[in-house]
Image (tube, rainbow, N blue to C red):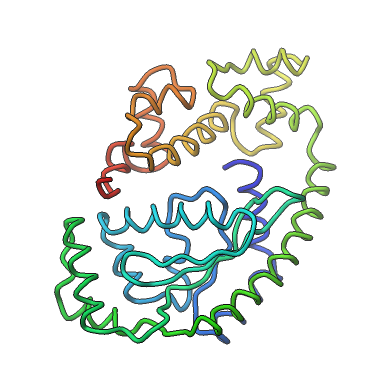
Amino acid sequence: MNENGQLIETLGQSRDYRDYESAFSETTGLPVTLRSVETWQLPLHGKRKENPFCALMADKSKTCGACLQMQEKLAQSAMNEASSLTCAYGLCESAVPVKLGNQTIGFLQTGQVMHQKPTSAGFQRAVDYARTLGADLDNEHARDAYFQTPVLSEKKLHSINHLLRVFADHLSMKSNQISVQQANSEPPVISRAKKYIEEHLTEDLSLGQVAQAMHTSIFYFCKLFRKVSGVTFTEFVSRLRVEKARNLLLNPNLRVSEIAYEVGFQSLTHFNRVFKKVVGESPSDFRGHLPAA
Protein backbone atom coordinates (compact mmCIF):
# COMPACT_ATOMS: atom_id res chain seq x y z
CA MET A 1 0.00 0.00 0.00
CA ASN A 2 1.46 3.40 -0.98
CA GLU A 3 1.41 6.53 1.20
CA ASN A 4 -1.88 7.82 -0.25
CA GLY A 5 -3.50 4.45 0.36
CA GLN A 6 -2.27 4.52 3.96
CA LEU A 7 -3.66 8.03 4.35
CA ILE A 8 -7.09 6.93 3.10
CA GLU A 9 -6.99 3.99 5.50
CA THR A 10 -6.19 6.36 8.38
CA LEU A 11 -9.08 8.63 7.40
CA GLY A 12 -11.41 5.64 7.14
CA GLN A 13 -10.55 4.58 10.68
CA SER A 14 -11.14 8.05 12.12
CA ARG A 15 -14.07 8.76 14.42
CA ASP A 16 -15.31 11.50 12.07
CA TYR A 17 -15.61 9.11 9.15
CA ARG A 18 -17.14 6.24 11.12
CA ASP A 19 -19.81 8.57 12.54
CA TYR A 20 -20.52 9.95 9.06
CA GLU A 21 -20.74 6.48 7.50
CA SER A 22 -23.26 5.35 10.10
CA ALA A 23 -25.41 8.49 9.84
CA PHE A 24 -25.30 8.52 6.03
CA SER A 25 -26.43 4.91 5.65
CA GLU A 26 -29.17 5.17 8.26
CA THR A 27 -30.51 8.41 6.74
CA THR A 28 -30.32 7.52 3.04
CA GLY A 29 -30.66 3.74 3.20
CA LEU A 30 -27.59 3.47 0.94
CA PRO A 31 -24.10 2.06 1.43
CA VAL A 32 -21.13 4.43 1.49
CA THR A 33 -17.40 3.87 1.55
CA LEU A 34 -14.10 5.71 1.50
CA ARG A 35 -11.86 4.02 -1.07
CA SER A 36 -8.38 4.62 -2.45
CA VAL A 37 -7.87 5.61 -6.09
CA GLU A 38 -6.54 2.19 -7.06
CA THR A 39 -8.57 -0.73 -5.78
CA TRP A 40 -8.93 -4.37 -6.76
CA GLN A 41 -11.96 -5.01 -4.59
CA LEU A 42 -15.55 -3.88 -5.02
CA PRO A 43 -15.66 -0.81 -2.73
CA LEU A 44 -19.23 -1.21 -1.47
CA HIS A 45 -19.15 -4.99 -1.00
CA GLY A 46 -19.88 -5.93 2.60
CA LYS A 47 -20.91 -2.41 3.58
CA ARG A 48 -24.03 -1.62 5.58
CA LYS A 49 -27.10 -1.29 3.31
CA GLU A 50 -25.34 -3.01 0.39
CA ASN A 51 -27.73 -3.76 -2.47
CA PRO A 52 -28.59 -7.51 -2.32
CA PHE A 53 -28.26 -7.85 -6.10
CA CYS A 54 -24.80 -6.23 -6.06
CA ALA A 55 -23.79 -8.51 -3.20
CA LEU A 56 -24.83 -11.49 -5.33
CA MET A 57 -22.77 -10.21 -8.28
CA ALA A 58 -19.74 -9.64 -6.05
CA ASP A 59 -19.76 -13.29 -4.97
CA LYS A 60 -19.59 -14.57 -8.55
CA SER A 61 -16.06 -14.35 -9.94
CA LYS A 62 -17.10 -13.76 -13.55
CA THR A 63 -19.61 -10.99 -12.85
CA CYS A 64 -17.29 -9.55 -10.20
CA GLY A 65 -14.66 -8.97 -12.88
CA ALA A 66 -17.09 -6.90 -14.95
CA CYS A 67 -17.97 -4.85 -11.87
CA LEU A 68 -14.28 -4.20 -11.18
CA GLN A 69 -13.86 -2.76 -14.66
CA MET A 70 -16.83 -0.48 -14.06
CA GLN A 71 -15.19 0.70 -10.81
CA GLU A 72 -12.03 1.58 -12.72
CA LYS A 73 -14.07 3.69 -15.18
CA LEU A 74 -15.86 5.45 -12.31
CA ALA A 75 -12.55 6.26 -10.64
CA GLN A 76 -11.16 7.75 -13.85
CA SER A 77 -14.25 9.91 -14.42
CA ALA A 78 -14.29 11.18 -10.80
CA MET A 79 -10.64 12.22 -10.54
CA ASN A 80 -11.46 15.94 -10.57
CA GLU A 81 -15.16 16.18 -9.78
CA ALA A 82 -18.16 14.15 -8.68
CA SER A 83 -19.26 11.57 -11.22
CA SER A 84 -21.99 8.95 -11.62
CA LEU A 85 -21.98 5.89 -13.88
CA THR A 86 -24.56 3.23 -14.65
CA CYS A 87 -23.40 -0.37 -14.92
CA ALA A 88 -24.52 -3.00 -17.43
CA TYR A 89 -27.24 -4.17 -15.02
CA GLY A 90 -28.79 -0.68 -14.84
CA LEU A 91 -27.54 0.29 -11.37
CA CYS A 92 -25.95 3.67 -10.74
CA GLU A 93 -23.00 4.48 -8.48
CA SER A 94 -21.47 7.87 -7.62
CA ALA A 95 -18.00 8.90 -6.50
CA VAL A 96 -16.64 12.20 -5.17
CA PRO A 97 -12.88 12.89 -5.02
CA VAL A 98 -11.02 13.31 -1.73
CA LYS A 99 -7.85 15.34 -2.20
CA LEU A 100 -4.48 15.99 -0.63
CA GLY A 101 -3.71 19.46 -1.91
CA ASN A 102 -4.43 19.25 -5.64
CA GLN A 103 -3.93 15.48 -5.83
CA THR A 104 -6.88 13.07 -5.68
CA ILE A 105 -6.02 10.33 -3.17
CA GLY A 106 -9.39 8.57 -2.89
CA PHE A 107 -13.15 8.76 -3.27
CA LEU A 108 -16.29 8.81 -1.20
CA GLN A 109 -18.62 6.44 -3.00
CA THR A 110 -22.27 5.44 -2.78
CA GLY A 111 -25.06 4.19 -5.04
CA GLN A 112 -26.23 0.77 -6.21
CA VAL A 113 -29.55 2.40 -7.11
CA MET A 114 -31.85 2.72 -10.11
CA HIS A 115 -33.56 5.84 -11.43
CA GLN A 116 -36.70 3.88 -12.34
CA LYS A 117 -38.46 0.92 -10.75
CA PRO A 118 -37.02 -2.49 -11.66
CA THR A 119 -38.95 -4.29 -14.39
CA SER A 120 -39.13 -7.83 -15.68
CA ALA A 121 -37.65 -6.63 -18.95
CA GLY A 122 -34.76 -5.02 -17.10
CA PHE A 123 -34.11 -8.20 -15.14
CA GLN A 124 -34.12 -10.23 -18.35
CA ARG A 125 -31.50 -7.89 -19.81
CA ALA A 126 -29.40 -8.44 -16.69
CA VAL A 127 -29.80 -12.21 -17.07
CA ASP A 128 -28.78 -12.02 -20.74
CA TYR A 129 -25.73 -9.90 -19.96
CA ALA A 130 -24.61 -12.19 -17.14
CA ARG A 131 -24.99 -15.15 -19.47
CA THR A 132 -22.44 -13.57 -21.85
CA LEU A 133 -20.01 -13.65 -18.93
CA GLY A 134 -20.77 -17.28 -18.18
CA ALA A 135 -22.96 -16.64 -15.13
CA ASP A 136 -26.52 -17.84 -14.57
CA LEU A 137 -28.93 -15.34 -12.94
CA ASP A 138 -32.12 -16.92 -14.20
CA ASN A 139 -33.43 -17.90 -10.77
CA GLU A 140 -35.79 -16.60 -8.10
CA HIS A 141 -33.03 -15.61 -5.70
CA ALA A 142 -31.40 -13.29 -8.22
CA ARG A 143 -34.79 -11.95 -9.32
CA ASP A 144 -35.83 -11.13 -5.74
CA ALA A 145 -32.51 -9.40 -5.10
CA TYR A 146 -32.83 -7.38 -8.32
CA PHE A 147 -36.31 -6.15 -7.41
CA GLN A 148 -35.09 -5.00 -3.98
CA THR A 149 -32.91 -2.35 -5.61
CA PRO A 150 -33.58 1.15 -4.19
CA VAL A 151 -35.06 3.64 -6.65
CA LEU A 152 -33.96 7.29 -6.53
CA SER A 153 -34.80 10.15 -8.84
CA GLU A 154 -31.87 11.97 -10.40
CA LYS A 155 -32.77 15.02 -8.28
CA LYS A 156 -32.55 13.03 -5.03
CA LEU A 157 -29.33 11.36 -6.11
CA HIS A 158 -27.90 14.80 -6.88
CA SER A 159 -28.77 15.89 -3.33
CA ILE A 160 -27.13 12.80 -1.87
CA ASN A 161 -24.02 13.45 -3.94
CA HIS A 162 -23.95 16.96 -2.48
CA LEU A 163 -23.76 15.41 0.99
CA LEU A 164 -20.76 13.43 -0.22
CA ARG A 165 -19.07 16.55 -1.61
CA VAL A 166 -19.45 18.45 1.66
CA PHE A 167 -17.90 15.65 3.68
CA ALA A 168 -15.23 14.99 1.02
CA ASP A 169 -14.10 18.60 1.50
CA HIS A 170 -13.86 17.95 5.25
CA LEU A 171 -11.82 14.79 4.65
CA SER A 172 -9.54 16.69 2.28
CA MET A 173 -8.75 19.17 5.07
CA LYS A 174 -8.08 16.30 7.48
CA SER A 175 -5.85 14.58 4.93
CA ASN A 176 -3.65 17.67 4.79
CA GLN A 177 -3.47 17.81 8.59
CA ILE A 178 -2.56 14.12 8.85
CA SER A 179 -0.01 14.42 6.04
CA VAL A 180 1.76 17.27 7.84
CA GLN A 181 1.78 15.30 11.09
CA GLN A 182 3.18 12.21 9.36
CA ALA A 183 5.82 14.25 7.55
CA ASN A 184 6.96 15.67 10.86
CA SER A 185 7.04 12.25 12.53
CA GLU A 186 8.70 10.27 9.70
CA PRO A 187 12.48 10.69 9.43
CA PRO A 188 13.36 12.66 6.28
CA VAL A 189 15.68 9.87 5.11
CA ILE A 190 12.75 7.41 5.00
CA SER A 191 10.51 9.91 3.17
CA ARG A 192 13.26 10.44 0.59
CA ALA A 193 13.84 6.69 0.33
CA LYS A 194 10.17 5.97 -0.38
CA LYS A 195 10.13 8.63 -3.07
CA TYR A 196 13.32 7.18 -4.57
CA ILE A 197 11.83 3.68 -4.57
CA GLU A 198 8.68 4.85 -6.39
CA GLU A 199 10.77 6.70 -8.98
CA HIS A 200 12.98 3.63 -9.63
CA LEU A 201 10.37 0.92 -9.11
CA THR A 202 10.81 -0.61 -12.56
CA GLU A 203 14.56 -1.07 -12.01
CA ASP A 204 16.37 -3.93 -10.29
CA LEU A 205 16.28 -2.21 -6.89
CA SER A 206 18.40 -3.45 -4.01
CA LEU A 207 18.61 -2.47 -0.37
CA GLY A 208 22.25 -1.49 -0.85
CA GLN A 209 21.43 0.75 -3.82
CA VAL A 210 18.77 2.70 -1.92
CA ALA A 211 20.90 2.94 1.23
CA GLN A 212 23.76 4.32 -0.85
CA ALA A 213 21.46 6.85 -2.52
CA MET A 214 20.37 7.96 0.97
CA HIS A 215 24.02 8.17 2.10
CA THR A 216 23.51 5.71 4.97
CA SER A 217 24.90 2.32 5.85
CA ILE A 218 22.89 -0.73 4.80
CA PHE A 219 22.54 -1.89 8.42
CA TYR A 220 21.25 1.49 9.65
CA PHE A 221 18.88 1.99 6.72
CA CYS A 222 17.46 -1.56 6.93
CA LYS A 223 16.77 -1.26 10.66
CA LEU A 224 15.28 2.25 10.43
CA PHE A 225 13.12 1.44 7.39
CA ARG A 226 11.49 -1.55 9.08
CA LYS A 227 10.95 0.36 12.33
CA VAL A 228 9.27 3.31 10.60
CA SER A 229 7.38 1.47 7.83
CA GLY A 230 6.39 -1.65 9.73
CA VAL A 231 7.58 -3.87 6.86
CA THR A 232 10.94 -4.84 5.43
CA PHE A 233 12.44 -3.07 2.44
CA THR A 234 11.76 -6.12 0.25
CA GLU A 235 8.11 -6.37 1.37
CA PHE A 236 7.55 -2.68 0.73
CA VAL A 237 8.96 -2.85 -2.81
CA SER A 238 7.04 -6.05 -3.60
CA ARG A 239 3.73 -4.58 -2.45
CA LEU A 240 4.23 -1.44 -4.52
CA ARG A 241 4.99 -3.54 -7.61
CA VAL A 242 2.03 -5.85 -7.06
CA GLU A 243 -0.27 -2.87 -6.54
CA LYS A 244 0.82 -1.47 -9.90
CA ALA A 245 0.53 -4.90 -11.53
CA ARG A 246 -3.06 -5.39 -10.36
CA ASN A 247 -4.06 -2.19 -12.06
CA LEU A 248 -2.28 -3.15 -15.30
CA LEU A 249 -3.96 -6.58 -15.29
CA LEU A 250 -7.27 -4.83 -15.93
CA ASN A 251 -5.95 -4.13 -19.43
CA PRO A 252 -6.58 -7.34 -21.44
CA ASN A 253 -4.16 -6.21 -24.16
CA LEU A 254 -1.12 -6.59 -21.90
CA ARG A 255 0.45 -10.03 -21.43
CA VAL A 256 1.19 -11.15 -17.88
CA SER A 257 4.88 -11.42 -18.74
CA GLU A 258 4.89 -7.84 -20.06
CA ILE A 259 3.29 -6.61 -16.86
CA ALA A 260 5.80 -8.50 -14.71
CA TYR A 261 8.76 -6.74 -16.31
CA GLU A 262 6.90 -3.43 -16.56
CA VAL A 263 6.53 -3.22 -12.78
CA GLY A 264 10.12 -4.21 -12.06
CA PHE A 265 10.19 -7.99 -11.60
CA GLN A 266 13.18 -9.67 -13.20
CA SER A 267 11.47 -13.01 -13.84
CA LEU A 268 7.94 -14.20 -14.49
CA THR A 269 8.31 -17.00 -11.92
CA HIS A 270 9.27 -14.53 -9.19
CA PHE A 271 6.39 -12.25 -10.17
CA ASN A 272 3.87 -15.09 -9.99
CA ARG A 273 5.15 -16.20 -6.59
CA VAL A 274 5.14 -12.71 -5.03
CA PHE A 275 1.78 -11.78 -6.57
CA LYS A 276 0.13 -14.90 -5.15
CA LYS A 277 1.68 -14.28 -1.73
CA VAL A 278 0.33 -10.72 -1.59
CA VAL A 279 -3.02 -11.17 -3.37
CA GLY A 280 -3.86 -14.77 -2.55
CA GLU A 281 -4.14 -15.92 -6.17
CA SER A 282 -1.97 -15.97 -9.29
CA PRO A 283 -1.99 -13.09 -11.83
CA SER A 284 -3.69 -15.39 -14.36
CA ASP A 285 -6.44 -16.32 -11.89
CA PHE A 286 -6.93 -12.66 -11.00
CA ARG A 287 -7.24 -11.74 -14.67
CA GLY A 288 -9.48 -14.77 -15.27
CA HIS A 289 -12.17 -13.08 -13.19
CA LEU A 290 -12.38 -10.30 -15.77
CA PRO A 291 -14.75 -10.63 -18.72
CA ALA A 292 -13.36 -10.90 -22.22
CA ALA A 293 -12.89 -7.55 -23.95
Q: Provide residue 112's location: percent of width, then percent of height.
A: 43, 73
Specify the quadrant of the image occupied by residue 32: bottom right
Q: Residue at x 39, y 52 (%)?
A: 69
Q: Nearer the viewer, residue 27 or 154?
A: 154
Q: Provide residue 235's location: percent of width, then percent of height.
A: 53, 31
Q: Nearer the viewer, residue 254 or 23?
A: 254
Using the image, determine if residue 18 lies above or below residue 283: below
Q: Residue at x 30, y 65 (%)?
A: 57
Is residue 279 toward the left or the right of residue 230 in the image?
left
Is residue 253 toward the left or the right of residue 14 in the image?
left
Q: Nearer the viewer, residue 78 or 264?
A: 78
Using the image, determine if residue 148 lies above or below residue 89: below
Quadrant in which the N terminus is drawn: top right
Q: Provide residue 14's location: percent of width, then percent of height.
A: 69, 64
Using the image, determine if residue 218 lies above or below residue 116: above
Q: Residue at x 46, y 65 (%)?
A: 85
Q: Residue at x 53, y 22 (%)?
A: 202
Is residue 226 toward the left or the right of residue 268 in the image?
right
